[in-house]
Structure formats: C-alpha cells, structure tokens
Amino acid sequence: MKKTIRTLLTAVLITGSVSLFADKLPKKEYVKVPEGRSITMQPSINNLGHAYGTVAIDFVMNKKGKVISARADRRHTTVRDKAFVRKVEEAVMTMEFNKDRHAPDMQKGSLAYSFR
C-alpha cells in the first residue's frame, strides 16, 4: 500500500513538472509575412535563456527567402534584457521562407514571441 501511494505521488510530481516546463516554452503571438510567403525553417528559440514578457521582431527577407536583417520592435517588446533580445534577433536571422522569384528584392515581416 505504501509503495502504491509513493508511486502515485511520484507520478503526480513528474506530471506537474512536465506541465510546468511546458508553460515556460515561448509561445508565438503573431507572425506577419508578405502574401505568398511561408516559413520553411523555424528559428530555435527554446534554449535562449529565461525571460518574462514579449519580444517583437521586425525582419527583412530577400527573394530567396533568407532573412537579411532582424531588429527588435521597441514599442512592442516588453523584455528589457538586451542580451536576451539580441539572442532572439539572431535566432530570427536563421529563419527561412519559400523562394519567390517574382517578389521584390526585399520584403518586410514581423513576429512576436511571448516568454513566461
């Protein structure tokens, strides 16, 4: 009986830890890309560190779908840790979109992540 209770309590603790960890992963609030474009490679932002708030990024992509610049939108970013925001900007630089040979040389987009 004691072993069953101990096993049950352990299971509850593990389940609570997993759901607590899942809540701390960043959540994408919005992504705005030009019409006809879609993300082919997502940025890896799960292991950038700990922060609370939102990081909004404005980015520019070329015809090939490569992000050529990414800057934090200061009006919509609530995270004040500049090093963390810089890491998010660098991660967004790794994003890739579908190629569009009929697109302008540069197109703008934006996205925001919520960190909790």
Image: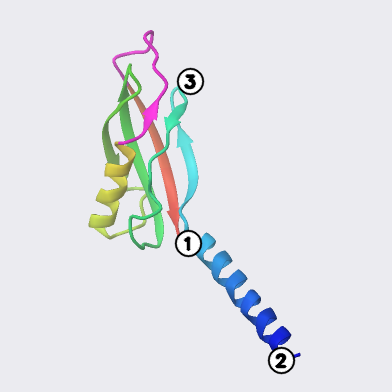
In the image, residue 45 lies at what x, y percent?
38, 49
Return the residue nearer the eye: 39 or 75: 39
For mark 2, what is the residue?
2
In the image, residue 82 lies at what x, y percent?
24, 56
Residue reaching furthest to the top:
102
Looking at the image, residue 7 lies above or below residue 65: below
Looking at the image, residue 34 lies above or below residue 69: above
Residue at the location (33% across, 37% down)?
Answer: 58
**Residue at disc 2, secondary structure:** helix
- Lower sequence index among marks 1 and 3: 1
| Three-letter amino acid code of the residue under disc 2 | Lys
Return the residue nearer the eye: 110 or 98: 98
In the image, residue 71 lies at what x, y percent?
27, 40
Measure how far apart labels 2 and 1 are at the Cα level: 33 Å
103 in the magenta segment: yes
For mark 1, what is the residue?
24
108 in the magenta segment: no
Looking at the image, residue 3 lies above or below residue 43: below
Magenta range: 94-106
In the image, residue 103 lies at what x, y percent?
37, 12
Badge nearest the viewer, 1 or 3: 1
Measure how far apart labels 1 and 3 are at the Cα level: 31 Å
Disc 1 crowd, CA 10 A, few/some/many (<14, 14-19, 20+)? some
Classify residue 17 by image quadrant: bottom right
Image quadrant holding the N terminus, namely: bottom right
| Three-letter amino acid code of the residue under disc 3 | Glu
| Three-letter amino acid code of the residue under disc 1 | Lys
**Residue at disc 3, secondary structure:** loop
